[in-house]
Amino acid sequence: MSDQPRRPRKPAKPYRRPKKDPVRVLAFEALRAVDERDAYANLVLPPLLRKAREEGDFDTRDAALATELVYGTLRRQGTYDAVVAACVDRPLREVDPPVLDVLSLGAHQLLGTRIPTHAAVSASVELARVVLGDGRAKFVNAVLRKIAQHDLEGWLERVAPPYDEDPEDHLAVVHSHPRWVVSALWDSLGGGREGIEDLLRADNERPEVTLVARPGRATTAELLDEEAAVPGRWSPHAVRLAEGGEPGAIAAVAEGRAGVQDEGSQLVALALANAPVEGRDRMWLDGCAGPGGKAALLGALAAERGAVLLASEKQPHRAGLVARALAGNPGPYQVVAADGTRPPWRPGSFDRVLVDVPCTGLGALRRRPEARWRRRPEDLDGFAPLQRGLLRTALESVRVGGVVGYATCSPHLAETRAVVADLLKQFPDADLIDARPLLPGVPDLGEGPDVQLWPHVHGTDAMYLALIRRTG
């Protein structure tokens, strides 16, 4: 037995309770809602922010940081997954989703923001202690310290395959899009590497808030009086909030005289309204009207000409949103809840018809970044019959000499030109008309006669429009 005295044990450090950071806890809650409930961030985040403000926890800077953490993490999810996968000793599918959300939030702070490294790691570990517990917080700490060893460019060199070996996979990792989406967008866009990279970069940028002044109810001059408001690029009714801002705080928006609407959507409605028709011009139809943005603009334009708009939406709750958007329209209108593929109206009843059909939404990835991770190639097969059915009904609903506008918020060829080509084969008495002259001042609209807008070219969602006239 040793005669040496035992060293006294160091007293255990007192347990320190984790500090709750309201900004990061809110961002985590938003990501969990997106993951668990298939919610959309643009619907989940505003009420969370509003509640935080009401409780006195948030100021404007806090709200801006929370918004950046949520949207930035969702946009770069594919890239961050590749980085995290390189730093853990198990497949990502074996990492609990809440843990992965905390790691992704931490990765975004380290690789996608100017937050100092030590602050990003310590804040993420504190978040993990609050929402995951001390045990898993140690795992988060170890992984984030590995991630902090390189910046984003350094990680991309390690986790992205070389462009020359696999161009699509390289772009998928570097620009955080699923490979099949990269391939589909590239096919629709055409051209070489520069164009597709510009498009993918634009998808990862936060879009400006764009307002529409509904004719007869509000003017752009009224909206331009708002702080940081600037004119739209292409639509005469558009105003952009260059520095962000809260649209709901603007009187014209709160009163329904103006609304939030991407400029690409405004251009679709304007092109249909300005297309020449033969003979009368009294009855207009929006055959897929929910949630009501295009219907409200069309209704206002129809009222200026003494025409009547019928807005049809299959889902009753969405029809209610359409009715709310049209409330106060200066001219007559009607809203009905009806299936656009089996309509209650007679064939040949309308002079102008718009069908903005349900689609994959690949043209709005700036606004709904989570959609890129939810959509699958097989979703196209599900939308195809509906898109063709709605266009068929639209062509049956318009009279001879009238015009149909087929629109999608997707540039995927299977949802745009393929649908139009199929239906034109079934309707030999229908012809495409050139939509480009109906969008004066808008550059780079391609060879026509249809139009594809692009985020990186036009600053809009990737809206597609084909105008079709019934000729006999």
Image (spheres, helix red, strand yellow):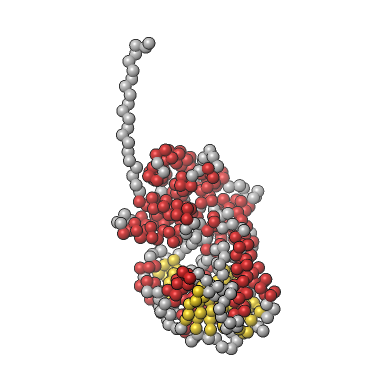
Residue shown at the point (50%, 81%) measured from the top left: 309
Residue 244 place in picture, x, y as percent: 41, 64
Residue 240 place in picture, x, y as percent: 44, 69
Closest to the observer, 411 or 459:
411
Furthest-left residue in this view: 56
169 lies above or below 417: above
Q: Is residue 393 visible?
A: yes
Q: Quadrant of residue 340?
A: bottom right
Residue 253 place in picture, x, y as percent: 39, 72
Residue shown at the point (54%, 39%) measured from the top left: 90
Q: Is residue 442 visible?
A: no
Closest to the observer, 323 or 244:
323
Q: Quadrant of residue 142?
A: top left
The quadrant of the picture occupied by the C terminus is: bottom right
Furthest-bottom residue in this view: 279
Residue shown at the point (62%, 79%) measured from the top left: 396
Closest to the observer, 285 or 266:
285
400 lies above or below 39: below
The quadrant of the picture occupied by the N terminus is: top left
- Numbered circles on residues, count: 0
360 lies above or below 19: below
Residue 292 place in picture, x, y as percent: 47, 72
Closest to the observer, 127 or 335:
335
459 lies above or below 222: above
Residue shown at the point (59%, 73%) measured from the top left: 341
